[in-house]
Image (spheres, rainbow, N blue to C red):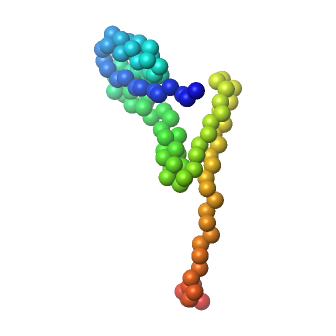
Amino acid sequence: MSEPKTVLIIDDDSDYVRAIQALLESSGYKVRSATNGRDGLQLAKTGLGLVICRRIVDELGGSIEVDSKEGEYTVFTVKLPVAQPRQEFEGSEAVGK
């Protein structure tokens, strides 16, 4: 089963946040909330490094796997394809030799 998608709610009306949070959680979402922009920004920054890594790995044709046991460990495995050796062309000599 895949991880639930996470939603961040930022609103200064705590009653609204609780109502939307309950609705989203009942639909299977993981919800993080803040009642001001500063706290919301801090929550949004958390985990950004992994998002960037995933985008780079995807661009390179690789994959990221995760194995985790809450409160004990988390292991990320990054797999990238082996690079093909560069082909040297006839007459390609280093300049200055």
Q: Which quadrant of the view contains residue 18?
A: top left
**Is 88 in front, or is 41?**
88
- Vertical placement of 90 versus 50: above or below? below
Residue name at image x 66 percent, y 33 percent: 67
**Is 16 in front, or is 3?**
3
Is the N terminus in the top left, top right, bottom left or bottom right quadrant? Answer: top right
Q: Residue furthest front?
A: 1
Q: Position of residue 84 (x, y in %)?
A: 61, 66
Q: Residue furthest right?
A: 72
**Is 62 in front, or is 53?**
62
Residue name at image x 59 percent, y 72 percent: 86
Q: Which quadrant of the view contains residue 10?
A: top left
Residue name at image x 62 percent, y 69 percent: 85
Residue 78 visible in the picture: yes
Residue 49 visible in the picture: no
**Is 50 in front, or is 62?**
62
87 on left or right of 9: right
Q: Position of residue 82 (x, y in %)?
A: 64, 59
Is the C terminus in the top left, top right, bottom left or bottom right quadrant? Answer: bottom right
Q: Position of residue 7 (x, y in %)?
A: 42, 26
User: How many labels, in total?
Assistant: 0
64 on left or right of 8: right
Q: Position of residue 11 (x, y in %)?
A: 32, 20
